[in-house]
Image (cartoon, rainbow, N blue to C red):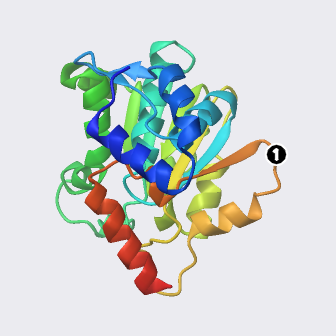
Amino acid sequence: MQIREREVVYLIKLREVDSLKKAVPFFLNRKAIIYTASGKPVMPKTFTQQEYVNTIDKDELIFGVGPAGTGKTYLAVAMAVKYLKQNKVKKLILTRPAVEAGEYLGFLPGDLKEKIDPYLRPLYDALYEFLGYESTNNLLETGVIEIAPLAYMRGKTLEQAFIILDEAQNTTSMQMKMFLTRLGFSSKMVITGDPSQTDLPKGQKSGLKEALSLLKDIKQIKTVKFERLDVVRNPLVQKILEKYEHDES
């Protein structure tokens, strides 16, 4: 069993919250979700990450919510690539509400792809890590993988697909409803975001917050909640989050 620096940090956090006893079976029994293009195993790093992966495997529509740095998007893409490789789906669709670029795409000057791609870059980077640059681009060219702003999902019914909506806190109510109703047969949908953060104009309701409230009683829809304890980036990130949360409370 190999323990890396980030796992040591997590063990220290578990000790602080008196949850260290569960750590040994967790680290002994966890398995690789997938291997990167360079051969590195991708494994859950926290209890919540393991719950998230298990939930994605079992259920059809999953919300993964919590602070930045908890692996919500990374693990969702890992699972999507796994499903594609195992021929469980025929298509991967990754999308974000392009708030920073102006979701009203008609107002964007110049080449659309050139303007939107920087905002979608984290999704490309995850795919490159799992599939490699050449393979990813081939799958993009053939339409097996599609990465696009949320506005482009309108009117589509997504069947036999693994669909990821990232940064969902930046969706409007109408956008979220539009997205959720695109789910077709033999598909899986994962929605990630941080309800405490939004780039929407002041006073505009987040579609993610509304969906979490409206849909909480539907048994087939599952929500996995990440906490600061699950932050797997530099330990300094957790301290920064703690200070901001304290200031906002």
In this view, 124 is above or below 211:
above
Residue drawn where x is 41% and y is 85% of the image:
247
In this view, 58 is above or below 13:
above
Image side of residue 177 versus residue 69, left or right: right
Which quadrant holds the N terminus?
A: top left
Is any atom of residue 141 visible in this view? no
In the foreground, 49 or 222? 49
Q: Position of residue 34 (x, y in %)?
A: 41, 20
Q: What element carries label 1?
A: loop
Q: Where is residue 9 in the image (x, y as percent from the top left)?
A: 34, 47
Q: Position of residue 77 (x, y in %)?
A: 42, 35
In this view, 175 is above or below 129:
below
Image side of residue 176 versus residue 60, left or right: left
In this view, 121 is above or below 198:
above
Dot 1 crowding, Cα within 10 Å, few <14, some 14–19, many 20+? few
Q: Position of residue 179 (x, y in %)?
A: 59, 52
In the foreground, 50 or 198? 50
In the foreground, 82 or 20? 20
Count of all numbered marks drawn on residues in the image: 1
The residue to which callout 1 is attached is 219
Residue drawn where x is 58% and y is 37% of the image:
22
Q: Residue furthest top?
A: 86
**Rendering quarter of residue 242:** bottom left
Q: What kind of residue is marked 1?
A: Lys
Is any atom of residue 237 visible in this view? yes
Residue drawn where x is 38% and y is 68% of the image:
104
**Rendering quarter of residue 200:** bottom left
Residue drawn where x is 39% and y is 35% of the image:
146
In the foreground, 12 or 183? 12
Image side of residue 62 versus residue 241, left or right: right
